[in-house]
Amino acid sequence: MRSERGFTIVEILVAIMILSVGLMGLVTTAGLVTRMIGQGHRSTEASALASERIEVLRAQGCPAAGSGTETRGAFIVSWRVVAMAAPKGRGIMVSVQSPTTRGTRNDSFETVHYCP
């Protein structure tokens, strides 16, 4: 009987199974990370659109601002301006609706603009 060094077929099969389980975990994680990156991108764009709308409403002045809706690409931006009695100013509420693979996502933003 010769003493040869090497791996047995059982050891190789066990190593392949362990490697397969690890690779399956990596594939699953890659899909999750891809979805999270897409969600982060949509949230960032929604925030930028809401910020832009708030700045436009502030620039219009207190008496001129009103409510409305606009479509910007795949996003629907809606805003509502509410007068405040004390302190004198107005509340600005902006809602951004964005498409996702599972439907739509709504992000809401609120701020107060004080009038001189």
Image (spheres, helix red, strand yellow):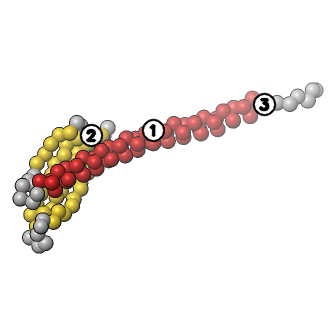
Q: Which residue is mark 2?
A: 99
Look at the numbered disc 1 and give the secondary structure of its residue. Answer: helix
Mark 1 Cα shell of 10 Å, populated few (<14), some (14-19), many (≥20): few
Q: Which residue is mark 1?
A: 31
Relative placement, left or right, of 29 versus 1 is left
Q: Please say if 92 is above or below 35.
A: below
Q: Which residue is mark 3?
A: 8
Q: Nearer the viewer, residue 24 or 116?
A: 116
Mark 3, mark 2: which one is toward the viewer? Answer: 2
Q: Nearer the viewer, residue 74 or 60?
A: 60
**Residue 86 at x, y percent in the picture:** 11, 73
Q: Quadrant of residue 109?
A: bottom left
Relative placement, left or right, of 104 versus 92 is right
> Of callouts 3 and 2, which one flags the residue occurring earlier in the amino acid sequence?
3
**Residue 91 at x, y percent in the picture:** 15, 62
Relative placement, left or right, of 93 versus 31 is left
Q: Quadrant of the C terminus?
A: bottom left
**Residue 90 at x, y percent in the picture:** 13, 63
Q: Residue furthest bottom?
A: 86
Q: Are marks 3 and 2 in contact (CB under 8 Å)?
A: no
Q: Amino acid at mark 3?
A: Thr
Alpha carbon distance from label 3 to label 2? 54 Å
